[in-house]
Image: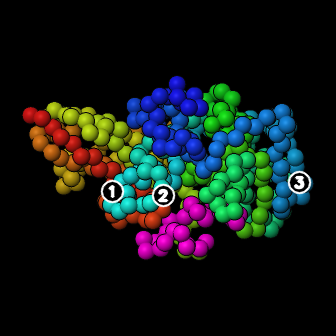
Amino acid sequence: MGSWNKRDDMLVHQDEPYNAETPPDALVDRITSLEAFYGRNHAPIPRIDSGSWRLRVDGLVGRPLELSMDDLRRFRERTVVATLQCAGNRRADLIEVRDIPGQVAWGPGAISTASWSGAGLADVLAEAGIRPEAAHIAFEGADESQQADPPQLFGGSVPLAKATSSEVLLAWSMNGQALPPAHGAPLRVIVPGWIGARSVKWLQRISALAEPTDNYFQTEYSLLPPEVDPRTAGPGDGITLGPIAIHCAFLRPCRGARLTAGPTEVSGFAFAGDDRTVARVDVSADRGSTWIHADLDPPANPWTWQHWRATLTLPPGEGELVARAWDSTAAVQTESPATVWNPRGYANNAAAHLHISCSA
């Protein structure tokens, strides 16, 4: 096993802070194992004593709370299967269009799915008594990032309507086991269908606010226009990221595989984000001139990925496979990464392209 009890074949982009994506063969399962679940961090992973740890609930509430783990476990335990995905997933495709300095070149593996258990955030907020003027719920972790100037604890916020949805959890368990330190122990937020940055790890504070949090990472995770310099961008220059946009990726064959011409099964995953589902996946063996419909697994719920597969007849020589997904609102992926390039490399929802080479 590698760092943080992860598989040796994790694609590690950085050791400190630990940033590693899941290998393709571990993404074919509906549930990702703990040792293969991707890691995305902006600071060193803290180790927290759960016995002395407390969660503060404050801001626009009638009854501020300070809760231990024993206090939290008195709330009804809920379980949800949810896919988490880094906002920079598939950034490598954007970097091929134009360089994005200072950003991790994530492939398609900054995504994983787990079964999460914990208290419903709505139940805890109800205990605190949300005041009428509250419109956003902010989260603050224990990990201090040097990326902010001055250094700042990682945080973010979501609108009250999302925070009080039944699927949003304060999770202490992952795949039936105690939440590992690398994934936020003793407690983290799980905001299904939204970018992973809103599922704050090592949670220590929840605040009810009238406006979105001013935490550095709330607006750092925003989609900037191509011409904007991210070093000088202000909070109003981009679109703050929340729900994930429809996209898909190839898992088999893998990049660089040598294939034999003829009927070949290709497969991958698609994820719609928010509370949408994937309605259709189209696959092409001729760079998008013609398409076939892939077989698509039904979703476990609206907050999980869906796997797909199709058999294509591949000609000998060099070629390019393309896959595109449609969601339940009829939104479809854009054709090329060039059309969604942005200076932070977020939210790549372009169609998946895979160069192949087939022998006769």
Instruction: Give the Cα distance between marks 3 and 1.
Output: 49 Å
Can you say whether 196 is above or below 71 in the image? below
Q: Any mark on residue 102, and which?
A: 2
Depth check: give the residue in front, 255 or 294. Answer: 255
Please identify the dominant SS of the magenta region: loop
Residue 84 seen in this snapshot: no
Instruction: Give the Cα distance between marks 3 and 2.
Output: 40 Å
Q: Quadrant of the C terminus?
A: top left
Secondary structure of the residue carrying tag 3 is: loop
State the extent of the magenta-drawn residues as a range. 212-235
- Give the mark toward the camera: 3 or 2: 2
Instruction: Give the Cα distance between marks 2 and 1.
Output: 15 Å
Q: Name the residue under label 3.
A: 64
Where does the image place residue 218, in percent across and percent down from the top left?
Answer: 63, 61
- Give the mark toward the camera: 3 or 1: 1
Secondary structure of the residue carrying tag 1 is: helix
Quarter holding residue 119: top right
